[in-house]
Amino acid sequence: MRVRLHLAATAGLLALALPLAGCGLGSDPSSTDSTLVWGLGTAPRSLDPAHAFDGESMLVSNELLEPLVSLDPTGKPVPRLAESWEQPDPRTYVYHLRSGVRFWNGADLTAEDVVYSIERHRDPAVASELAGYLAEVASVEATGPLEVTIRLRSVVPEFAHTVALVSHTVEKAFAVEHGDNLGDSTTLTMGTGPYRVTRFSSQGVSLERNDDYWGTAPAMAELDFEVVPDAETLRLALDSGEIDGTFGVPPDSSRSWDALDGVTVEYVSAPVTTMLTLDVSAEPWDDVHLRRAVAYAIDREALVRTVFNGHARKAASIVDPELWSDLLPDDQVAALYDGLADHSYDPDRARSELAASAHPDGVAFTLQYPAQSPAISKALQVIKANLADVGITLTLKEVTPDKWLGDIYAHQDLGAQMLLLGADYPDPGALPRLLLGKANMSPNGFNLANFSTPETERLLGEERSPDPATRTAALSRIMQIAGEELPYIPLYYGDEALALDDDLEYGVAYSHWVPFFQEWASHVRPVS
């Protein structure tokens, strides 16, 4: 399976933002005819979820296309298009759809629409970025006019959560008619969500309220997404009232955002791991001593302190310890992490490992990163200086977010990469299932280190056991292997933030799970 590539607040597609026209709340913030103007760092790559598996695209698509279930602020699956579901056996899920749900064109939602939308991701010709989530799916069938049954080949403990990502439903007839053009700026899409799309381009997206929506209607009649790739320009736009809110607060600039008058910024801890990925299948990263030299050379504590103003946590593993809450008590989680290999900043040990490697005189390598990403850029400058101090030369190459993401999905010439990955459900197995194993060593796979061992493959199977003790033991050993072999060098877990004009309020608890795994805009409303 795969998890979301986390792009929010880190990237932008355009050199210039759409001119801001001051079209926010205006003089009557209590009016339900108001327009909510939301700032994005980058435009959606597509309105087709098969080709838009990134944070910014999902912010938009969640308002348009609805999945069978969403995740609540705690990460728990809750009803969406499915009003209920059952699991008659560990490998079968039966979803009962709501009646009376209609697409924007007036057509009734049917089970066939849902089946078609899921099956598209399994079609190799579509080359869906979500295909990995469905690797263990045996069949998806309409077992009634409003009933969908999904059968798995093997037990997949996380499937109840991940169905929230793979079932965003488009009308089958519309999708078939428009074929490869589905989701582009001309064809758009056809969904059942609380908003319908009226404009989509590289400069932004405009939505209007769906007055025929089956659920609670949004407070705002229109929702405009404006692309503002520069973080400082985004901050000034919020300060001037030209936009009303954003999830794109860069943690490295938190002090200036916190100082905004008439704006509230709320920070939440997020299970998003930022790491260096090293392709162990090719030189020079096939040398474990070199990988360890890099790990010891990086001062993560200084990076968190100086770059992120405390809005990040030093990472000891690819797995955020907060993801263990449902499996282990806090004291046992702490003991687990205390037992992992410690690669804290130690330049002398870095030099010793380099001397023991096949490259005792050092190496030079290039790493590309997405443009308009000040936090990543600043972090990489710290890393570059750290590595230079021990004899390793890092050259940084800034590229467009499209190229950065496209090269990652292509799974070619991987070398060293800077990767940010957020968990898609509150479980410690989320990232290991993605980052390790042969199943993910292919295009659209996220084992960017091409790391696999017989023991790791066996453990990845064991960690899917329904028995918590078996899962805990397998995951603990997987983390130990990853910590010893270092195919990935974990750097930090970053906070996420919501910045909102004080004339507005967010009607539910805000958490990491809110903007990317549920319909979020309906919760933004004028302060009463």
Image (cartoon, helix red, strand yellow):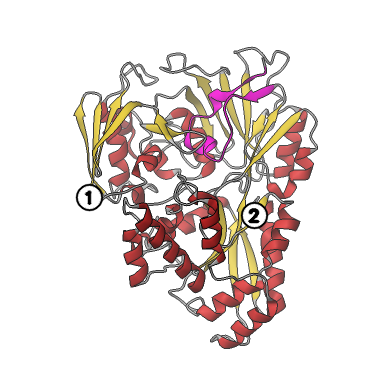
Give above or below for 383 relative to 515. Answer: below
Residue 263 seen in render? yes
Of callouts 1 and 2, which one flags the residue occurring earlier in the amino acid sequence?
1
> Magenta span covers which residues?
504-527
Instruction: Give the residue number, with chain letter if any, for mark 2.
Output: 313
Residue in front for this viewpoint, 484 or 292: 484
Badge 1: residue crowd in 10 Å (few <14, some 14–19, many ≥20): few
Q: Amino acid at mark 1?
A: Arg
Residue 312: image location, x then y, percent = 66, 52
Q: Quadrant of residue 354?
A: bottom right
Instruction: Give the residue number, with chain letter if any, for mark 1.
Output: 153
513 in magenta: yes
Q: Amino acid at mark 2?
A: Arg
Residue 194: image location, x then y, percent = 47, 22
Give above or below for 397 relative to 2. Answer: below
Judged from the image, the secondary structure of the residue bearing numbered disc 2 is strand
Asked whether, in this view, residue 498 is left or right of residue 104, the answer is right
* Residue at 35% across, 58% down: 470
